[in-house]
Image: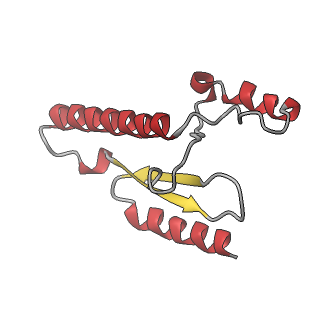
């Protein structure tokens, strides 16, 4: 989804690892034509999602091994949504929940879509 939207920025809740707080403060001093401090490019965004996927798969295998293969309730499921914008780079939102709560996740995702479509 991010690749299809040509996303060039990754925002997440772990700013201590990507310096987002510092980069966001840099925006106020940015001059026209200067690169956006959060813009890492499409290749870096693709690498980010590949690493996220590999980490999720590693955790999944660890949970499976620890539970003898019966661990569906411990899995996390998620959905990524592109959010509509009038201009500027594309943005998205990731929603996650514990396994077994998919119906809540999809209900919340539908609500988010309706809110942003208005």
The quarter in which the C terminus is drawn is bottom right
Name which quarter of the figure residue 8 lies in. Answer: top right
In the figure, 7 relative to 24: above or below?
below
Q: Residue at x 63, y 36 (%)?
A: 39
Q: Position of residue 67 (x, y in %)?
A: 18, 37
Give 5 or 79, whichever is nearer the viewer. 5
Give 12 or 77, whichever is nearer the viewer. 12
Q: Position of residue 13 (x, y in %)?
A: 59, 36
Q: Position of residue 107 (x, y in %)?
A: 49, 70
In the figure, 81 relative to 15: above or below?
below
Q: Residue at x 38, y 62 (%)?
A: 102
Name which quarter of the figure residue 58 lies in. Answer: top left
In the figure, 100 relative to 21: above or below?
below
Q: Position of residue 108 (x, y in %)?
A: 53, 65
Q: Residue at x 16, y 46 (%)?
A: 70
Q: List the single residue furthest toward the left.
A: 68
Q: Residue at x 74, y 24 (%)?
A: 22
Q: List the single residue furthest toward the front.
A: 33
Q: Is residue 92 left or right of residue 72?
A: right
Tally of numbered discs: 0
Q: Is residue 21 left or right of residue 57?
A: right
Name which quarter of the figure residue 1 lies in. Answer: bottom left
Give 52 or 63, whichever is nearer the viewer. 52
Query: What is the basis of the colouring in this image?
Result: secondary structure
């Amino acid at each position: 989804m991010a690749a299809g939207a040509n996303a060039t920025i990754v925002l997440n809740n772990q700013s201590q690892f990507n310096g987002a707080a510092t980069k966001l403060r840099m925006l106020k001093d940015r001059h026209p034509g200067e690169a956006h401090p959060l813009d890492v490019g499409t290749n870096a965004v693709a690498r980010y999602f590949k690493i996220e996927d590999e980490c999720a798969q590693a955790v999944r295998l660890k949970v499976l091994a620890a539970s003898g293969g019966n661990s569906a309730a411990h899995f996390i499921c998620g959905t990524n949504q592109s959010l509509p914008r009038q201009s500027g780079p594309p943005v998205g939102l990731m929603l996650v929940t514990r396994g077994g709560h998919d119906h809540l996740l999809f209900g919340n995702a539908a609500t988010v879509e309706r809110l942003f479509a208005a």
